[in-house]
Structure formats: C-alpha cells, structure tokens
Image (cartoon, rainbow, N blue to C red):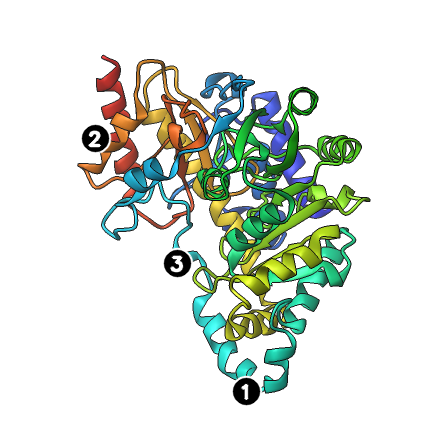
C-alpha cells in the first residue's frame, strides 16, 4: 500500500471501531503531516479518499470531520418509472421561461448549468493564445477547416490513449462546444419523426435538440446512482423502433449517476445487437472524484456505433466553445454536416487549448478542481441536511457538480422556483428534465461554485419555502 492508502486505512479503522465518532474533528493536514512524518500532499490524498468513501467530510475554514453514518443521512432518490409511451417533445418554452433570469450575476446560481468561472485558469489560457497564433501557418487554417486543428486533435487523441480508449484519429471532429457535437451526431443518424431513447430524467438541452430536429422521445428508467437500467432499455428496444440513444453514462445531468464499467459494456453490446447508434454525452468525465477517470462507453465500442462527445467548457475553458466528437463510423457524415452549418471552429481557441494541453497544464488544473468540487458537494449535502424538510432524498454523485434532490410529496418545484426567484435565487425544477414534465417535486442543484458565500443562506431560504409549501 502507498503511504496515503495506509494512513487512510488507519483512519477508516478508527472510524469503524468507534474510536473516532461522528462529528469529531480529524487532525489538521499540518498536524497529521508533522506527527506522521508524511507530506501534506499525502495527508490530503488520504483525506480525499476517505471523503470519497463517505467516511469524513470537509467543513469550510474548519477542517475535516467524521461523517454521520449512512443510516443517519438523507436517503437517495428511487429510480423513476417512465411512461412506456413515446412523446412529442415541447420543452423549450418552459426552459426559456424558467431559466431566463439565472444568467444575472446577482442571482445565486443553484439552478445554473455551469460551474463558477473562478475555478478555471483563464489567465493561463490567455497567455498561451498570442504565442500559439504567432506560430500558426496560414495555410493550415484552410486545410483544417472542418476537422479542426491537427495539434488539438493530437492532444485529444493522446488523452484517449492515456485513458485506455482506442480512437482512430480520423474519426475526431472539433466542434463549437459539445452541444454542436451532440447535435451533429444526432442529426447524422436520424430524420424528422424518428424515435430517440433518452434517460429519465434527462438533460433539458438534449430534449431541446430533439424538439428542434422534430424527433420523438422515449424515456428509459435511470437509476440515481448507476445510470441507465439495461433491462429497461432492452424492453424499450423490443417495443419501439428506436433510431438512436442519447445517454450520459458518466456523471449524468441532472442525476450525477455513473454507470459501472460492466453496465457500460452491456449497454454497448445491447445496442450493437440492435444496430442502434449511441450519442454519448461525456462532458463531465474529467470531473471524477475517484483515482482515475471512468472509461466512457466508447471504450467498449467495437462496431463504430458510439459517437463520443465532449468539450473543454465544463472543466477548463468556458466561453472558448471548443468541443469534439469521436464519431466512429459516422465521422464523415458529421464532417459534412459541420461543413454545411458552421464550417469550422474558431482557430485561436483551438490553438490556445492545444498549447495548454501540450505543456501539461490541464492535469495540473484538474487535480485541485476535482478536490474543490468534492469539498463543495460535501458542504452542500451537509447544508441540505440542516435546512431541507424531513423526507428529502438526495443523490451522492462520484463526480460532476450536480445534486438531484427529491423533496417530499406536496412540494411543487415550479412554484418553488418562482418563490426562490423573488429572493434572487435560481433553481432548476424537475419538470425541465422530462419530455412529459414529470418530477414535479424534484430539483437539480449546482455545487460548482465552491467560493460563493451565498450558497448556504440560499439553501436555507429554499428549504424554508419548501417546508412552508408542504404545510
């Protein structure tokens, strides 16, 4: 065992034996480093491991404490049972109405889809921009119009290799963010009127994409911890002429669920038997709290049916609008659609990101970001336990920056969103995440703003409003 593993296991044993009890403070990083003669980094890694296992929790400006036992915490939501019917998607007006005000800086961003800009190395990225553009050969701008910067595609390809996923460089297409990648992939394999399988609940932008392309949706049961339920998907494929699936196997938005590797393999094999392509949304994969990045479903694809889509927007460079797809057998179709729509992605953004990745800045940025998000999740879970009504259920994702909150029956989260907006608090109510507007007593909460002191007071207000509604 490594040093941090040994120290983590010693603390875990003290907790299991009752020597360290819930609520007790652990030695500070400095104290543990001095007394054990190990580096602060080793102590941090040990505490990070213990926190990921739910044994301890961080408290802002206070340190690490033994967590309450699982039985004393809020229960996790149960798997929803979606309707077996197919649905015409009409969600955009509701999305625009509900989320229109959340972009104001004075609104507490509990309902935001984005992490805080403060967690990104924007200054370091800006410093790479000018030198990268000076080195750019003007001829390359035309040569790499549709597929994107060769230097950036090389860096993206290397990350696939390091993560153990085999991707042919020829299937990579750089796009204007992940949403363009996802939309192009969906468009490449469907026609208006076709049926697409989505998770339940599902990210509202996926539903908006279906609406724009005049596609119908069928929802698949999705476990709050383990993601798409394979048996439910198999039944949907038997009953309906599904032309494509749009799933988020790693840290799904809004649930935060993570499909186990065996389930991802089973998912890809099931879809291969039916010849159904998968549009894989993997924008949160780098934001894992465990020791290694979970492999995408693409890692198990042997038939080119998985179109893996991701971007740098959620974990490195918001506003640069650089994403990509490894589109498998559909790469040429995606390239042609790109050529017919946006033609190319801005070259300065691509070159700046390629230079940043080449010099190792990405991983140096990701390590503290993951820790900050894990700490922020622990703080939000503790605040929900203090301030939300009894009977509230909450997910505990192993990555990303969203919690899915199931409030007691009788709470209307569309009404709650309007009430919270009067207090300058943004919320994302459950009906946004379903084609037939279910999940009326659920919320998605964003814990991706670790330094925002307004978060806990806002949660206190939302908890009070929910309790008043219930009464």
| Left or right placement of residue 278 versus residue 311 in this view | right
| Left or right placement of residue 425 versus residue 134 in this view | left
The numbered mark, 1 or 2, whose residue comes first in the sequence reads 1
| SS class, disc 3 | helix
- Give the vertical position of 178 relative to 203 (above or below): below
Q: Residues within 10 Å of mark 1 (few under 14, many from 20)?
A: few
Disc 2 from disc 3: Cα separation: 28 Å
Give the foreground label among 2 and 3: 2
Q: Which mark is residue 134?
A: 1
Disc 3 from disc 1: Cα separation: 28 Å
| SS class, disc 1 | helix
Q: Residues within 10 Å of mark 3 (few under 14, many from 20)?
A: few
- Give the vertical position of 341 relative to 278 (above or below): below
Question: Which residue has dot 2 on it?
Answer: 419
Q: Quadrant of the N terminus?
A: top right
Q: Toward the viewer: 204 or 244?
A: 244
- The percent coordinates of residue 277 (x first, y second) are 69, 40
Q: Toward the viewer: 356 or 94?
A: 94
| Left or right placement of residue 120 versus residue 148 in this view | left
Q: Is residue 64 visible?
A: no
The residue under the point 49% across, 71% down is 125
The residue under the point 41% across, 41% down is 447
The residue under the point 21% across, 41% down is 424
| Left or right placement of residue 76 versus residue 62 in this view | right
Q: Quadrant of the C terminus?
A: top left
């Amino acid at each position: 065992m490594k040093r941090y593993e040994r120290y983590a296991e010693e603390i875990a044993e003290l907790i299991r034996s009752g020597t360290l009890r819930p609520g007790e403070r652990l030695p500070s990083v400095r104290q543990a480093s001095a007394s054990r003669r190990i580096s602060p980094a080793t102590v941090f890694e040990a505490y990070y491991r213990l926190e990921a296992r739910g044994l301890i929790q961080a408290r802002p400006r206070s340190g690490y404490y033994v967590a309450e036992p699982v039985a004393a915490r809020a229960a996790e939501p149960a798997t929803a049972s979606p309707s077996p019917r197919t649905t015409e998607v009409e969600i955009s007006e509701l999305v625009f109405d509900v989320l229109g005000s959340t972009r104001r800086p004075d609104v507490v961003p509990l309902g935001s889809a984005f992490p805080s800009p403060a967690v990104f190395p924007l200054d370091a990225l800006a410093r790479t921009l000018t030198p990268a553009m000076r080195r750019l050969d003007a001829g390359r701008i035309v040569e790499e119009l549709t597929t994107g910067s060769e230097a950036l595609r090389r860096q993206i390809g290397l990350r696939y290799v390091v993560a153990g996923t085999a991707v042919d460089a020829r299937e990579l297409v750089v796009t204007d963010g992940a949403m363009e990648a996802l939309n192009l992939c969906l468009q490449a394999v469907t026609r208006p009127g076709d049926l697409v399988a989505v998770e339940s609940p599902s990210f509202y932008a996926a539903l908006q994409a279906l609406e724009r392309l005049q596609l119908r949706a069928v929802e698949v049961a999705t476990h709050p911890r383990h993601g798409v339920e394979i048996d439910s998907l198999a039944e949907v494929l038997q009953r309906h002429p599904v032309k494509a699936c749009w799933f988020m196997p790693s840290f799904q938005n809004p649930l935060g669920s993570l499909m186990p590797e065996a389930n991802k393999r089973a998912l890809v094999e099931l879809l291969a038997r039916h010849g159904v392509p998968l549009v894989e949304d993997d924008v949160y994969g780098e934001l894992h709290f465990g020791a290694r990045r979970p492999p995408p479903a693409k890692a198990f694809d042997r038939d080119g049916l998985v179109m893996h889509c991701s971007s740098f927007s959620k974990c490195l460079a918001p506003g640069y609008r650089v994403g990509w797809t490894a589109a498998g057998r559909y790469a040429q179709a995606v390239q042609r659609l790109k050529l017919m729509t946006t033609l190319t992605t801005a070259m300065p953004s691509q070159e700046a990101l390629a230079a940043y990745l080449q010099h190792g800045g990405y991983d140096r940025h990701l390590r503290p970001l993951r820790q900050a998000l894990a700490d922020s999740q622990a703080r939000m879970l503790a605040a929900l336990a203090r301030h939300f009504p009894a009977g509230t259920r909450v997910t505990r994702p192993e990555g990303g920056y969203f919690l899915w909150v199931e409030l007691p029956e009788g709470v209307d989260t569309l009404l709650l969103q309007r009430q919270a907006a009067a207090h300058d608090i943004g919320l994302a109510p459950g009906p946004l995440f379903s084609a037939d507007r279910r999940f009326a007593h659920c919320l998605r909460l964003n814990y991706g703003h670790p330094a925002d002191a307004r978060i806990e007071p806002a949660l206190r207000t939302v908890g009070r409003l929910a309790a008043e509604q219930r009464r």
